[in-house]
Amino acid sequence: MSDDTKDQTRDAAPAKSPGRPSTFTQEIADFICESLMEGHSLRSICAADDMPNKGTVFRWLAANKEFSDQYARAREAQADCLFDDILEIADDGRNDRYVDDEGVARTDYDVIARSKLRVDARKWMAAKLRPRVYGDKLAIGGADDLPPIKTMTDEELDAAIAKAAAAANGNHE
């Protein structure tokens, strides 16, 4: 191949596409967080060609405290969005019943089961994103045949520990 042909080949090569962004910008961070707050998953946000991939976002989160804090707040807001979705799904009964070919109204249990799955998935995710608000509350107490667990002041606790230590050493008070 002559030098002229090499130059023509090099000149004819297509321009390199810009690709996914890998440099942090506040504009991209804001878009990611706003999308999360609207209920979109990070996976769906990063699927767009003009968005960074998930690995890049996770590197940005590790390297940038402000973005990490903003992201955490967006995830908390996402839990509130999921809660709203739960109410909409639960209240929407439009497809729960249908009329079959003979004109008989029937219940579509598959649609109801799918709605339940959608609600349960959102409840689980909301509980993980904001456990204090949407998580299960744990009640800690004694067994049914025992009195409830009693709270003690620091002084009462110190006295109980001293009494137990004395009993362990053979000094019964």
Image (cartoon, helix red, strand yellow):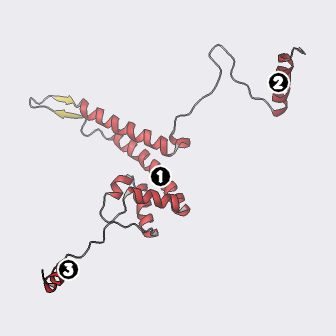
Q: Position of residue 148 (x, y in %)?
A: 68, 21
**In the orientation shown, which residue stands out farthest toward the left?**
102
Q: Which type of secondary structure does the marked residue at label 3 adopt?
A: helix
Q: Nearer the viewer, residue 67 or 85?
A: 67
Under mark 3, the amino acid is: Arg
- Residue holding disc 3: 10
Quarter residue 158 falls in: top right
Residue at (27, 72) in percent of width and height:
17
Q: CA distance from mark 2 to mark 1?
A: 44 Å
Under mark 1, the amino acid is: Arg
Vertical order, 71 against 95 (above or below): below
Residue at (49, 58) in percent of width and height:
61
Q: Position of residue 12 (x, y in %)?
A: 16, 79
85 sits to left or right of 167: left
Marks 1/3 in contact by CB < 8 Å: the verdict is no
Task: Say the numbered circle drawn on residue 160.
Answer: 2
Task: Say the numbered circle drawn on residue 75.
Answer: 1
Q: Position of residue 96 (x, y in %)?
A: 25, 35
